[in-house]
Amino acid sequence: MKLGRIALLLAGATALEFFFGGSKYRGVWPVDWLLVATAIVARSGGFGRAVLTGTAAGFIEDALMESLLGLNAFAKAGIGYVLAFVSVRVIFGGALAVGGVIALCSLVNDVIVAFLRSLLLAAPVVLGAPEALWRAVATGATAGVLEAAWSFPWREWRERRRQGRLR
Amino acid sequence: MHNVKFPAARAEITSRPRRGGMLLASVLVLCVLALSAQAPARGRRGSVLQSWILTAAGPVAGAFGAISRSVSGASASFADNFTARSDNERLRRELQRRDEELFRLRAEVRQIRGELGLHASAPFLPAVVGSAPVLLLERRAGLQSALIGIGSSSGVSAGSPLAVPEGLIGRVVTAGRTLSRVQLLLDASAAAGARIVRTGDLGIVRGDGRGALLLNHIPTTSRVRPGDLVESAGIDGIYPRGIPIGRVDSVSRGGTLFLDVRVVPAAPFSRLTDVLVLAPFPAPEPEGASAAR
């Protein structure tokens, strides 16, 4: 994936974070858009770009919401690498598998950030909160839907519909 | 996810993990260095770098927040059209009831003001700096923070308490020019001095990072019971006294000398749209005051 597209993707993810974050319905479907952006880049199989995208996405999140810069960057860089590794080495596909992996990544992100916050800020470790689980579900489901939409044979489907109308 | 069909391409891609691994290691080391550099300087006020970043992100966040509000406002007004008539009737009745209540409350306030001398406690009453929209709300691994659309250009500074009419919300930790980052009271690292209104017991309210509050240091001899109102005590040097925090949900005997008291927050944290920023407490001294002393 080209750098320009990655930058656009990150800008789009940040815009979506603000768009949904500013709404009072933010808790209904709390998607981690920056993780989805990292996963999209990792899906193309580029290790370096996946790591750098994860780092950039994490830094954006840290700059806006965290007390220390680098917590989410650390987590998302690792997640980017693992996702790129999975994309290249493990042959799997389908919305369900992709959604499941991304949901798991969202939880792993939480665990890493909680561990680092406890280590560096002496903050209590809070894991398994309902909100975190719900965000993992929402992020995984959204990534699954995007994967399904991406791999759907739209051209053949349009062609079949056109032929059906002609008959 | 990525099914590579050509051997040459596959060989090219699979030769990259080593380079990617090196890059990952470098990035992780850089992150650790950055975190280590910030950790000793952490405190209430946040870093200068974060303040600059918030200032730079202000226009973008404001624009997207405004778009989001317009869209949700438009959808809400569309939905409201369907229920407008019945709502109108209900609101008329409610307005009449409120008018009567307002009249009664005004009379009571006048009486109480006269009896207790409210003016004596005026210095403790919070002054509102302004109101601000909530642009982002983050809940991750015990962290409960928000981004609000007001900053140092409107007189907000780190440490300013935040509230809504229902109760206390938290405090500003980093103030940019037009954006500020807020630590919510529900954050696992947040705490506030609190008082049980009925019994007068003082304690410390802490966020549990999961959406509830814990009231600590209440002795087992206390007569606290579920439903008691908990308000800020003004003993922590951050929050002014007398702002509702929540109501006692459950009381149980802990393993120590103190009770385990769970408190349900008074403020609707999950549906926050706008917040009131209060003047820092205690109010900062005038410029000349410390020099004169």
Image (tube, grey):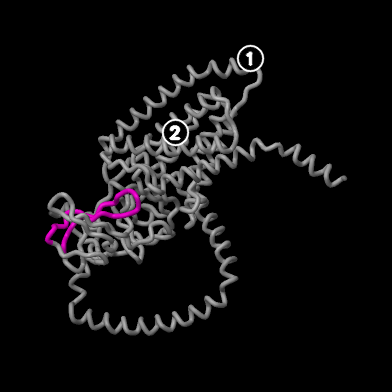
Q: Is residue B207 magenta?
A: yes
Within-10-Å neighbours for mark 1: few <14, some 14–19, many 20+: few
Against A98, residue B5 (above or below) is above
Against B146, residue B278 (above or below) is below
In percent of width and height, residue B49 lies at 36, 39
SS label for mark 1: helix
Against B33, residue B82 (above or below) is below
Same chain check for tags 1 and 2: no
Residue segment shown in magenta: B201-221
- Screen quadrant of the C terminus of chain B: bottom left
Label 2 chain ID: A
Give the camera-side residue of B20 and B263: B263
Amino acid at dot 1: Ala
In percent of width and height, residue A55 lies at 45, 32
Amino acid at dot 2: Lys
Residue A30 seen from this side: yes
Within-10-Å neighbours for mark 2: few <14, some 14–19, many 20+: many
Identify which residue is drawn at 32% across, 35% down: A115
Residue under pointer 2: A76
Give the camera-side residue of A71 and B258: B258
Image quadrant where residue B243 sits:
bottom left
Residue under pointer 1: B8
Identify which residue is drawn at 47% across, 51% down: A21
Against A65, residue A6 (above or below) is above
Q: Is residue B121 magenta?
A: no
Label 1 chain ID: B
In percent of width and height, residue B63 lies at 52, 52
- Screen quadrant of the N terminus of chain B: top right
Residues at marks 1 and 2, CA–CA distance in whole angstroms: 30 Å
Residue B172 seen from this side: no
